[in-house]
Amino acid sequence: MSTFKAPKGTYDLIPPESADFLAVREALSAPLRRAGYGYTETPGFEQVELFARGVGESTDIVTKEMYTLTTKGGDELALRPEGTASVLRAALEASLHKSGNLPVKLWYSGSYYRYERPQKGRYRHFSQVGAEAIGAEDPALDAELIILAHDAYRSLGLRGFRILLNSLGDKECRPVYRAALQEFLRRLDLDEDTRRRIDINPLRVLDDKRESVQRQLTDAPMMRDHLCEGCKSYHEQVREQLTAADVQYEDDPRLVRGLDYYTRTTFEFVHDGLGSQSAVGGGGRYDGLSEMLGGPPLPSVGWALGVDRTVLALRAEGVELQLPSSTDVFAVPIGEEARRALFRVVTALRREGVAADFAYGGKGMKNAMKSANRSGARYALLAGERDLAESVAQLKDLQSGEQTAVPLDRVVSEVRAKLA
Ligand code: ATP
Ligand code: MG
């Protein structure tokens, strides 16, 4: 062991568990790639100001959780805590919205950083797969994103997740509701911090996890009862599309995502096997964000799914992913000449798409067979002097123990036929 450990709140992805992680990333993004979303990658850091505006000055992310740094050149940067602000920034910078082809649909996958109190399912470095549909207001688009996330989780074999759905209104009806909520909250018995939140971001108080606060919120006014006709009908259409797609959801009038420019549709995917870190993903409509970043009005909707928590949810449900084996054939040469011959065969196998590995390091036959078994390979490919004299190798089925001699120049076709 070295003297160094992974920093607090982080963990390393190493085999064999890392294979699950990769498969989850792949599965979460597969439905997006089939729905016209294009892959996007942005830097791991941005100007602090982008997140201050794009996530919101009053959010926990910006006030407590950002990793910020000043460069030698004096720039104020932050490690990205989330993806939406960066992706929208990139789309605006490249003028993707001017292509005349709206919505611009983008997906991304990567590392995010938040200075949080580490717990199971809550890390300081974590991974998300995300999607943004920029520049269109259409209930079918909101429904599309929810359906795609639903289908992604289902394709992994997850069953124990629920979808919570709400509407946060728009710039017409939300301010009226906000004022009503503020008036209600000001009459409650709340601490200093929470009272300040009433002024800055009152919806966020509804999201307070403390029982002492929740107890007082039973009669709080709900956005649901304040939606204008436009928002009501929009939300009804989203719900209809979900039902038509056999996607079940729960109306959760208390679901808020806290940011002032989050509008209309908001949703969260929760999994009941994860304890208090139950959100595996979330998203919503953010019609005002582009303007907050200095862009034109571009009504948009998106989500981000947590890869780490999705892996934990799979474990909680006991789902075993069906992963392709990492090694199909493991070559075990006996003697120098056989090493050269089998190494050539291994290269040929790989070039033909067969996963193959080799007993490196000149270890003896017994150790080499141990490596073959440990690799999980279906077949061992053995050759010694006598085999080479006949230009064959022995293909051994590691499950049945059955062994057959195969001409060296036919190993590739033989193995491919057997694996097919
Ligand atoms: P939470 O309420 O659990 O803090 P959040 O609202 O901050 O979640 P989002 O910003 O919506 O989370 O991010 C989307 C998803 O990313 C979450 O649903 C979760 O699965 C994952 N995620 C967020 N923060 C973390 C973290 N610190 N560690 C691991 N996964 C995270
Ligand atoms: Mg959080």
Image (cartoon, grey):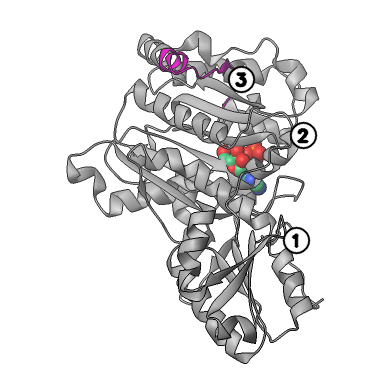
Residue at 41%, 33% in the rendered image: 286
> For the residue with label 2, is its CB less than 8 Å from the closest atom of ligand 1?
no
Q: 167 or 104, which lies in front?
A: 104
Q: 102 or 52, which lies in front?
A: 102
Residue at numbered disc 3:
254
Q: On the picture, is 203 further left or further right than 412? A: right
Residue at 73%, 64% in the rendered image: 373
The first of marks 3 and 1 along the sequence is: 1
**Residue 2, image x and y in percent?**
79, 78
**Residue 146, image x and y in percent?**
47, 28
**Residue 321, image x and y in percent?**
63, 43
Where disc 3 sits, the SS reads loop
222 to 304, vertically: above or below: above
166 to 410, vertically: above or below: above
What label does residue 275 carry, if any? 2
Is residue 254 one of those drawn in magenta? yes
Residue at numbered disc 1:
8
